[in-house]
Image (cartoon, rainbow, N blue to C red):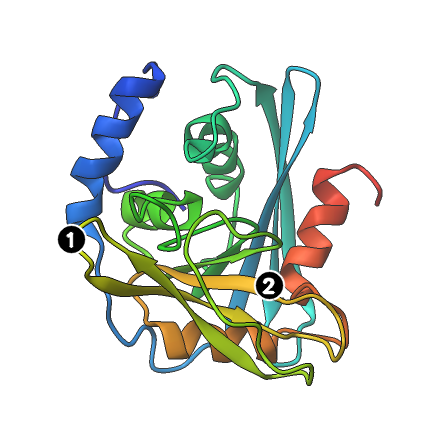
C-alpha cells in the first residue's frame, strides 16, 4: 500500500498544525466497504529515538492472521500532543508499503476524527492512502461524554463543543469488555461512526483491545 497523496514531513509544529487544517478538508465520511474480508491493525513502538511500526492483517470476521510486516526508522519529530502522526506516520507508511495484501479497513492505535483539528493519525494516513481507516485509542484526547454502561457493547457518544457553542459528534466511547475501561473510537477516513463501532466490537476476543491492534502492539513492542 502506497500513498496517493504526499506532503513534506520536514515541518515544525506550527507548520504541521497548518497542514492538519488543510488536510481536514479532505476527510470523507461514507459507508465504507460493503463487504469486509480482512482488516489490519497498526501500532508503533518507541525506544529512545527509534520507532518500530507493525501492521498485522487478519481475516474478518474469523480473525486469522494473513500477513504481518515490520518497519523501523529513527524518529525525526518531537513529541507534541495532537501531532502524533508527524512522529509516527513515516515509519507506518514504510511498513504499509511492504504489504502483499490490501486490507479492507485499517485500525490504528490512536485517534482519528476525535482530535482537536479532526486530524488524528487514523485520519491523516487514511487521507494519504485514500483508504478506509478508523482510530481506536486507549485514552481521550479531546471531547466530552457520559460514561457508557458497564456491559460489553455499550457505548456513548463523544462530543466536541466549539467556541460558538455548536456541538459536533467526534467519536464514541465503547465498552469492549464488561467492567473494563472503554476505548475511544472514531472514524479515520471513508467510513462512518456506526460502522467503525461495529468493526471494533467484531474484532474483539474477550479483551479490551481489538485483536488486530493487540497483535500489532506485541510486534511493535518487540514482545513477540
| Left or right position of 190 against 172 | left
- The answer to whether 205 is drawn above or below residue 43 in the figure is below
How many angstroms separate mark 2 from mark 1 (CA)? 28 Å
Q: Residue at x 72, y 55 (%)?
A: 215
Query: SS at mark 1?
Result: loop
Q: Residue at x 31, y 49 (%)?
A: 118
Q: Residue at x 21, y 60 (%)?
A: 28
Query: Mark on residue 175?
Result: none
Query: Mark on residue 183?
Result: 2
Q: Nearer the viewer, residue 102 or 17?
A: 17
| Left or right position of 72 against 171 | right
Outermost residue on the right side: it is 223
Q: Nearer the viewer, residue 44 or 157?
A: 157
- The answer to whether 88 is drawn above or below residue 104 in the figure is above
Residue bearing the label numbered 1: 164
| Left or right position of 11 against 26 | right
Amino acid at each position: 500500500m502506497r500513498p496517493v497523496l504526499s506532503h513534506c514531513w520536514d515541518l515544525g509544529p506550527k507548520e504541521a498544525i497548518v497542514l492538519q487544517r488543510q488536510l481536514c478538508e479532505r476527510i470523507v465520511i461514507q459507508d465504507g466497504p460493503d463487504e469486509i474480508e480482512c482488516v489490519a491493525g497498526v501500532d508503533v513502538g518507541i525506544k529512545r529515538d527509534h520507532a518500530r511500526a507493525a501492521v498485522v492483517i487478519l481475516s474478518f470476521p474469523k480473525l486469522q492472521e494473513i500477513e504481518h510486516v515490520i518497519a523501523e526508522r529513527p524518529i525525526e519529530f518531537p513529541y507534541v500532543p495532537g501531532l502524533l502522526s508527524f512522529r509516527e506516520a513515516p515509519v507506518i507508511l514504510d511498513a504499509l508499503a511492504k504489504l502483499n495484501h490490501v486490507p479492507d479497513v485499517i485500525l490504528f492505535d490512536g485517534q482519528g476524527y476525535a482530535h482537536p483539528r479532526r486530524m488524528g493519525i487514523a485520519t491523516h494516513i487514511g487521507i494519504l492512502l485514500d483508504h478506509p481507516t478508523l482510530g481506536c485509542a486507549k485514552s481521550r484526547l479531546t471531547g466530552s461524554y457520559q460514561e457508557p454502561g458497564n456491559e460489553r457493547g455499550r457505548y456513548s457518544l463523544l462530543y466536541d463543543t466549539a467556541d460558538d457553542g455548536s456541538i459536533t459528534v467526534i467519536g464514541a466511547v465503547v465498552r469492549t469488555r464488561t467492567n473494563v475501561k472503554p476505548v475511544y473510537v472514531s472514524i479515520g477516513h471513508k467510513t462512518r461512526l456506526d460502522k467503525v463501532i461495529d468493526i471494533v466490537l467484531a474484532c474483539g476476543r474477550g479483551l479490551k483491545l481489538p485483536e488486530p491492534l493487540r497483535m500489532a502492539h506485541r510486534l511493535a513492542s518487540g514482545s513477540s
